[in-house]
Structure formats: C-alpha cells, structure tokens
Image (spheres, helix red, strand yellow):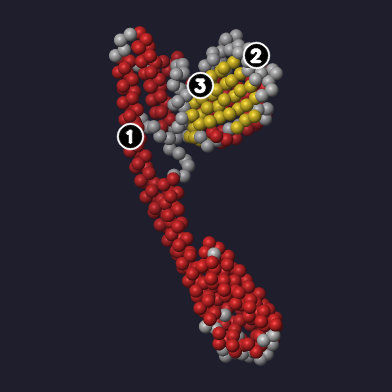
Amino acid sequence: MLSTSVISRWPRAGVADSGRIVSAGMRRFDRLFDLIVGGFGILYALQTADSLVAGLPSLSNPLGVAIIVLVCIGVAAGVGPLVAPAHAARVFLVGAAVYGVALLLWAHTVTPPVPVNPMPWLIAVWPVGAAYLARGSRTLFVPIVIATAVSAVASVALRFRGDVAAPDVAVDSLFMTGLALVLVLLLGTVRHRVVAAALAQQCSVDSFAAAQLEEATEQERKRTDALLHDAVLTTFLSAASADDDDAEELASRMAANSLRVLLHVNAVGRSEDAVPFGQIVADHRDQLGAWLSRFDHDLAAVEVVMLPENVARALVDMLAHSLANSVQHAEGATRRTVRAHQLGSDGIRIVIEDDGCGFDPEALGQRGSGGGSESSRALRALEGRVDIDTAAETGTRIVLSWGSVAIVGTELLVEQEDRARP
C-alpha cells in the first residue's frame, strides 16, 4: 500500500486541544479553591472580634492602630479571588506577608498585661495568615518552616515581653503551630490530589484524541491513495489510446511524470528519518557560514520543513557548492541573494542569485537543468532538481528544488527510465 503522508514529529493539534480542555477545568477548580480560602480567611477573622476587643487597651497607641490596620489589610486579601482571580495566589501571599509584618511589630512592642482568655488577637487571627500562606506557596515545606518560625517569635514575645505564664505560652504556641500544620497539609494535599487527577485525566484525553487522529489519518490516507492510483491509471489509459504522434508523446510524458510522482510519494511515505531542514543547515554551519556571510540570505521559511535526512544533506551540499562558485567566480557582482520557501506539501525550493559576470553552461559541459558537479548529480539521484539560468555578462540564477512538485517535468536519469516509462 502506498502512503501519501509523512509522520510528523511535531505536537498534534487534537492533543493540544484536549490539553486546553483539561487546563480550563483546572483553572475553574483553582478559582473555586481560592474563593473557599478567601471566604475562610474573612469569616474566621470576623469570629476573632472578641479577642480584638479584649486586647484593645494594649493596642490603643498609634503603633497599635497601625498593627490593627495592617492585620485588616492582610485579612482583606481574601477578596482577591473576586477582584483579581488570575492573580489570587499572589494576593494571598501579599496578605500573609502584611500579616507577618503586623505580627513582628506586635511582638516587638507588646507590653503586659496581655490577655490570655481570650488569647491575644494577633495569635487568634494567625490561622488566616497560615491559610493564605499555604495557598500562595508552591510547596509545603516553605509554609511549614515559616509557621514554625512565627510561632517561635510569638512565644518568645509573650513569655519575655508580655510576662505571660509558661503554660499559657505553651498553649498559644501549640495552637499556632498545630493549626498552621493542619491548614498547610490540608490545603496542599487537596490541591495536590486534584492536580494528579487532572494530569491523569489529561493523559486519558490525549490518548483518546491521538487514537482518533490516527484513525482519521489512516482513512484519509486510504482515500488519497485510491485517488492517486485512479489518476495514474487514467493517465496510462490516455497514453495507450493516443491516435497521433503528438498526443502519444504528450501522454507518454504525462504518464512518466505520474509514475515518478507515485514513486516519489511512496519513497517519502516509507521514510522514517525525516529531520527539520534547519537542523541540517545548523550541522553544516562551518561549511556554509563563510559563504552565507557574503549573501543577503533568508532561510527562515524552510527551517522547520521536514525532509529525509539524505535529501536535506544533498540540498545543503549543493547550496554550499553554489555559494562558493558565486563568491569565487561571479566577478563584478554587487548583489548576491539566497531565498527559500516550501514547495508544495512535501518539498523545498532554494534560489541563489547574483548579478556577476555569468557563464556559458554549454562551454562548461553543463545543462541548464542539471549542472555537472558531484553535488548536483547527488541531488538529482534523489529526485531533486538543479536549474541554472545564466549567460555571459547576465548574472546567474540557480534554483534547487525537491519534492513531488519539483520532479514533474524533469529529465529522467538513465537508471530511472525503465521503471518510469509507461
């Protein structure tokens, strides 16, 4: 069975689309998760109002007012998912940082008497900062370390600056550390499990999409093969039914071209070593660099064109040969260019031009459709074309082509005539 498709190594559109579907679902979960964390923070802070009222005497100074304002700003980060849903994690981190600044100021300025029942407000509201920190951080390790450090700072402040009894300090420290660990592990574990489930779902969807695409590609390949065989058969029948010499010659040429295209497509379909043309150019940069620097060149359009590796190397060799000839022999040239573009669905065309002195191909024993160098013969042996348009004092234009479009109308090599003749 002849194949009209080359298996590409680039990502499939169907698979990418399935990934976007799963990513959209993950984004919806993240937004819902952020709303839950934000709502928890605000509601939990509100229920600590009794601790705030009990501690107001120790926070009645200007610095205490600043601490209250900072805590309120930190708690207000809970509205981040509503105001800036795409940046909610960053907003939570900012809120946790603002709360941390307020806690440090309080620890530095706390003075007795410090209320212990209810517990100090800055400690009572600590779970809000811990939840925001757990949601904003990308790892579990950082929130746990910070929670332990904050608990230690608060414990030292209560014991040595607030003159709070050791048992009460121990209770507050255990509250801060224990609740922070629970929140960090709970929030982190929930999201980790959801991410794992989303990845598993994405793998399943990708596999299904790939299978569907492969099936559709196989069906399309079979239909294309059938059309191609019908076209070749029709051409052969036209050649067989020709009733005069001109029609017979035209039909014969059409049949030869059709068979060559068929042989080319079959060879390309079996090729498993296709590489980007730009990769081969990069591999030969030492060979090409010195010559290309003398040309106004642009090969960007063909860098990602997939070609059989032997074809790509033959094209690069012929390109280097043409560039070297132009630089060494095109006397008086003021303009040298190299341009390239994709040719058809599977081919490539490179055009090398200069406005130098030109030459007489017949005098050198070369034909306008091939050239006599080893490089040109190697390219033609792979169904490529080397077309030379030049004459004395007119400049030179060399066109290198390969692909099913390029081979139509080219001359047959001697060893190809028997298998390509209808």
Mark 2, residue position: 393
- Which sits earlier in the primary sequence, circle 3 or circle 2? 3
When the figure is inspected, residue 412 is found, relative to residue 39, above or below; the finding is above
Residues at discs 3 and 2 in contact (Cβ within 8 Å): no
Total labels: the figure holds 3
Among the 4 quarters of the image, the one containing residue 294: top right
Mark 1, residue position: 222
- Which sits earlier in the primary sequence, circle 1 or circle 3? 1
Q: Which mark is residue 246?
A: none
Image coords of residue 10 (percent x, y)? 48, 42
Image position of 242 (left or right of 331): left
The reply to whether residue 153 is in sight is no
Q: How far apart are marks 3 and 2 (CA)?
A: 24 Å
Question: Residue most toward the front?
Answer: 83
- Which sits earlier in the primary sequence, circle 1 or circle 2? 1
Mark 3, residue position: 385
Amino acid type, callout 3: Arg
Q: How crowded is mark 2: few (under 14 residues within 10 Å), some or many (20 or more)?
A: some
